[in-house]
């Protein structure tokens, strides 16, 4: 068995990886005192609530009534056996959890989606249409001299700033006062973007729907085209020309977006504009994209799905082989279109996101503290990888994976 | 329990057995001597007139890790015509240029392969590579860790640290990433690309570090030698795909200064600049240099016509090649101050002068290098072609008239520029057994694989001889893995897990102090979590780890 770091009682454990967001910070110092965990170093609100919150006693239930684990599992077996086309979604789990899901989906002919499937799909569509130039956290930490936050302020990922933007040491000539930060979007909180010496970031306010237009205009300016209007989406063209010049003269620029924050129809077109300008800039300098997300094991589940089936998420195994359709096989669509006849929801990291309620047999595998407003056919409280047992997860950049 | 394979025609180059009628005995997963006559044979297979070789070994195939998974995700169209349904025995998946892991394992086994080695495991992505390989059933696995563009090594070279420290670092990397060897990809070039350099010649300096590819090759070759790593430094050289790179390749061979070096997918590094199109075959010079330098081994990286995807750690040259992407989409990544990657889909067309000549160049190299112990059969899957095209490639090597028939259908100018039609050589079954079994096992230091002698692991492939070698090698009659029958008539009959081959070279542990401080300052994971535990590989019924001895 893998070492279960946080399970070592009465010890202070170093280098614990935190599974509660896509950053997977792995420098947490955690004390386990009589099975009560306390983060001594390197915490954030998500980590505190994930590691320190006491979990209420909880039991498996069948139709709302307490049952044994064996009976609950038998009941799941019956539900899945009767089902012609189950949906397994949520997928808040680690690598081994996802391996088990893949095997089960293959056996039962299930549809697979993740609770953050919309966000995942926004990126995947761009990958499959255009491709991209991307970078990872350590490269940003050491190389980036211009960072553009597009449609996200990254405040959900608080330690991102501490770890790779205002990091005290970096390998190359990246001096803190030379690092330029830019925010483009709606109601972005740029507070964390103020440098330790008080230098304020450049903020371009616009609606989320207009970010693509601004980036495409910057792209046009960079190619040498003249913009014949004096403003684009309320931003003065002059201001865009200055930024375009900064982008061209950056040694290593990065555009950061968070697909979850681009919650609008056809967000992939906006992400595409980021990837297009990055590709163009790479003809003259170095530039790269970076996607912030990967919460609840979403990068993990999509990766495991890809290597075992050949496709990223939103796959249907009903025909006996993987059938990929990222629009068709969303949780929302298959439930709305009544294409599935049983629902299995898995969420082992967060109790905040609720399973969909559907008028088909429902199996809920979730954290003990989840509050449901209905009685599913089966409920089993499940452990959290990295807290209750060991595991492995992928970080948001889809390159680094860590032991939990 | 004893199994007897009776009356087969055996090809076992390690023991100089060239098509002799022999019986082979298997006991508890191992090949064993003929037992005394009072011992009961539990199962006998009549192999009369059948060809018996040890299981084939692919020394260079991109089967797992980040860039392969990017290729899978980026190219749903790659899988659409090759969807694989589940059976009572096997899982569903898909095939083609970027197949699913499960299908990869089944198909390799169904072609008679029993071990596959991932050549480009980035240390920061090693965990993913092992996870994917764990999900490749039946065959044994292993991987080479990529070094040479990692900032840690370049800092050491820039500071002129002594060789002992560099060797300690290389030893640490092998241990930490559970690798079987060390590969270098465009030495220092991936790093230089991050500083916006677009090419890097063998003696050109990285503009930040002032270190040249030659410096890197030298340091890594020495480290591999000093650590006693059986497989020589696995070199993907400078200037991949660039016309004229033949000179760089010859210079690289000379840079080895007599030390062992493996030059991988050398076809992509064997181009001249002669002729109107400034693109010509360098196979003659390359083969001559390889023939003259017994310290050099190569694999070819043959291209075959059709759609595939190129997946490489060489971000610099993958970026340069993205203009030829087909379909028009591609990925380049900078990775963790460690490495990079580029994934560019590509279609090799027989009517294209360049592609047709690449096809000729690969075959010329195969046929001009005298010693099959030093040339291994690869397509650099999937970069030259998917691994499923190996039987076709074997036929091209074994059947001159078939080769010339195809030669007559490709771009006429390319065919006219090639000496291929003048080469009479045909590979024998013995040569094929050497280049796909005995040679790779020897090169990797796998002493009990790649042969059929007593004590060898009973990884055995049995074919029905056929004039059409493509048919013969596509569908073995029997494949045994660790003595168990896993394939019959080209179809999987049993699914089991192969092992992961690793090394544990000794090194001075005090290097961890320097590394720890580097990780804390500049990396975004901790040193402890960077290392991959044995448990992570073997848990949940995945195959065991086999630690191969160092030299």
Image: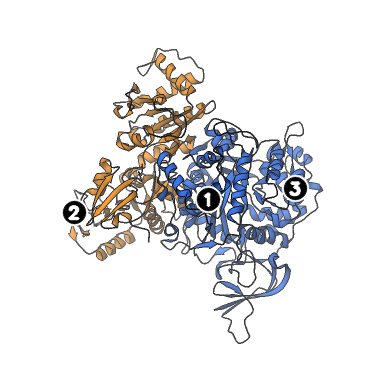
Chain colours: A orange, B blue
Q: Are marks 3 and 1 in contact (CB under 8 Å)?
A: no
Of tags 2 and 3, the one toward the viewer is: 3
> Mark 3 Cα within 10 Å, few/some/many (few <14, many 20+)?
some
Nearer the camera: disc 1 or disc 2: 1
User: What residue is shown with label 3?
Assistant: B287
Chain on which label 3 sits: B
Is label 3 in a helix, a strand or a loop? helix
Give the residue at mark 2.
Answer: A56
- x and y, in percent, of residue B199 in the image: 61, 33
Q: Is residue A137 above or below residue A286?
A: below
Label 2 packing within 10 angstroms: few (<14), some (14-19), many (20+): few
Direction bottom: furthest residue: B38
Q: In this image, B319 relative to B524: left or right?
A: right
Residues beneath discs 2 and 3 located on the same chain = no
Please give the name of the residue rendered at 59% of the width and 36% of the height, measured from the top-left corner: B211
Q: CA distance from mark 2 to mark 3?
A: 71 Å
Q: Between residues A184 and B288, which one lies in front from this camera angle?
A: B288
Counting from the top left corner in percent of width and height, residue B88 is at 46, 64
Q: Position of residue A115 (x, y in %)?
A: 32, 45
Q: Is A8 displayed left or right of B434 in the figure?
A: left
Tell me the quarter of the image containing the C terminus of chain B.
bottom right
Residue B85 appears anywhere in the view:
no
> Tag 2's secondary structure?
loop
Mark 1 lies on residue: B168
């Amino acid at each position: 068995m893998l070492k279960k770091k946080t399970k070592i009682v009465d010890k202070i454990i170093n280098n614990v990886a935190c599974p509660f967001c896509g950053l997977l910070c792995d420098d947490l110092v955690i004390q386990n005192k009589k099975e009560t965990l306390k983060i001594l170093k390197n915490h954030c609100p998500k980590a505190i609530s994930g590691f320190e919150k006491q979990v209420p006693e909880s039991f498996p239930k069948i139709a709302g009534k307490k049952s044994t684990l064996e009976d609950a599992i038998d009941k799941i077996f019956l539900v899945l056996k009767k089902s012609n086309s189950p949906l397994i979604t949520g997928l808040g789990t680690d690598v081994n959890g996802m391996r088990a899901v893949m095997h089960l989906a293959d056996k039962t002919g299930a549809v697979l989606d993740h609770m953050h499937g919309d966000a995942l799909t926004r990126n995947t569509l761009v990958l499959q249409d255009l491709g991209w130039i991307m970078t990872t956290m350590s490269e940003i930490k050491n190389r980036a001299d211009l960072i553009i936050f597009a449609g996200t302020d990254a405040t959900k990922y608080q330690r991102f700033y501490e770890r790779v933007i205002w990091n005290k040491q970096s390998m190359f000539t990246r001096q803190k006062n030379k690092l330029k930060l830019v925010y483009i979007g709606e109601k972005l909180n740029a507070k964390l973007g103020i440098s330790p010496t008080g230098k304020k970031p450049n903020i371009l306010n616009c609606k989320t729907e207009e970010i693509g237009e601004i980036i495409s205009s910057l792209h046009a300016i960079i190619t040498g085209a003249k913009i014949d209007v004096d403003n684009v989406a309320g931003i003065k063209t002059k201001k865009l020309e200055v930024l375009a010049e900064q982008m061209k003269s950056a040694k290593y620029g990065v555009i950061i977006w968070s697909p979850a924050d681009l919650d609008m129809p056809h967000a992939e077109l906006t992400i595409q504009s980021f990837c297009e300008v990055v590709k163009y800039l790479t003809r003259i300098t170095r530039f790269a994209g970076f996607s912030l997300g990967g919460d609840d094991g979403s990068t993990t589940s999509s990766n495991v799905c890809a290597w075992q089936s050949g496709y990223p998420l939103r796959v249907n195994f009903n025909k006996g082989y993987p059938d990929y359709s990222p629009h068709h096989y969303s949780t929302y669509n298959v439930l709305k279109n009544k294409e599935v006849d049983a629902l299995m929801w898995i969420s082992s990291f967060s109790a905040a996101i609720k399973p969909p309620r559907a008028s088909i047999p429902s199996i809920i595998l979730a954290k003990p503290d989840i509050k449901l407003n209905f009685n599913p056919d089966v409920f089993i409280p499940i452990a959290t990888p990295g807290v209750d047992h060991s595991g492995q997860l992928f970080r948001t950049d889809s390159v680094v994976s860590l032991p939990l | 329990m004893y199994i007897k394979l009776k009356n087969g025609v055996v090809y076992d180059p390690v023991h100089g057995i060239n098509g002799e009628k022999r019986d082979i005995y298997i006991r508890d997963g191992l090949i064993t001597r003929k037992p005394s006559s009072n011992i009961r044979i539990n199962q006998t297979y009549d192999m009369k007139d059948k060809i018996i070789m040890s299981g084939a070994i692919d020394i260079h195939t991109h089967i797992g890790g980040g860039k392969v998974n990017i290729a899978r995700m980026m190219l749903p169209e790659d899988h659409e015509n090759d969807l694989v349904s589940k059976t009572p025995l096997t899982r569903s998946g898909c095939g083609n240029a970027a197949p699913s892991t499960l299908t990869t394992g089944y198909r390799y086994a169904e072609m008679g392969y029993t071990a596959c080695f991932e050549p480009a495991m980035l240390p920061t992505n090693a965990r993913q590579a092992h996870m994917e390989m764990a999900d490749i059933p039946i065959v044994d696995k292993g991987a080479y860790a990529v070094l040479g563009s990692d900032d840690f090594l370049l800092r050491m070279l820039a500071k002129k640290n002594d060789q002992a420290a560099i060797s300690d670092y290389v030893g640490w990397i092998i241990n930490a990433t559970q690798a079987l060897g060390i590969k270098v990809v465009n030495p220092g070039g991936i790093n230089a690309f991050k500083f916006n350099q677009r090419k890097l010649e063998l003696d050109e300096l990285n503009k930040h570090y002032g270190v040249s590819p030659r410096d890197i090759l030298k340091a890594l070759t020495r480290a591999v030698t000093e650590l006693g790593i059986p497989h020589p430094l696995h070199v993907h050289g400078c200037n991949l795909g660039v016309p004229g790179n033949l000179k760089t390749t010859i210079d690289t061979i000379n840079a080895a200064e007599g030390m062992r070096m493996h030059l991988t997918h050398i076809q992509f590094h064997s181009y001249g600049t002669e002729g109107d199109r400034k693109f010509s075959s360098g196979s003659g010079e390359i083969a001559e240099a390889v023939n003259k330098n017994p310290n050099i081994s190569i694999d070819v990286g043959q291209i075959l016509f059709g759609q595939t995807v190129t997946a490489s750690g060489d971000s610099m040259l993958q970026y340069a090649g993205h203009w030829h992407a087909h379909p028009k989409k591609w990925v380049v990544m900078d990775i963790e101050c460690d490495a990079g990657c580029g994934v560019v889909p590509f279609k090799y067309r027989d009517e294209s002068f360049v592609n047709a000549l690449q096809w000729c160049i690969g075959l010329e190299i195969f046929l001009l290098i005298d010693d099959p112990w030093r040339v291994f059969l690869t397509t650099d899957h999937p970069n030259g072609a998917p691994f499923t095209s190996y039987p076709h490639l074997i036929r091209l090597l074994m059947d001159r008239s078939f080769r010339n028939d195809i030669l007559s259908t490709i771009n006429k100018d390319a065919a006219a520029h090639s000496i291929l039609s003048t080469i009479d050589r045909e590979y024998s079954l013995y040569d094929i057994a050497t280049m796909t079994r005995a040679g790779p096992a020897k090169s990797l230091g796998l002493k009990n694989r790649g042969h059929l002698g007593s004590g060898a692991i009973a990884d055995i492939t049995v074919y029905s001889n056929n004039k059409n070698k493509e048919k013969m090698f596509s569908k073995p009659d029997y494949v045994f893995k660790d003595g168990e029958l896993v394939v019959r008539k080209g179809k999987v009959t049993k699914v089991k897990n192969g092992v992961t081959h690793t090394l544990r070279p000794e090194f001075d542990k005090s290097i961890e102090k320097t590394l720890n401080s580097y990780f804390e300052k500049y990396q975004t994971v901790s040193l402890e979590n960077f290392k991959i535990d044995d448990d992570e590989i073997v848990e949940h019924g995945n195959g065991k780890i086999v630690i191969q001895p160092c030299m």
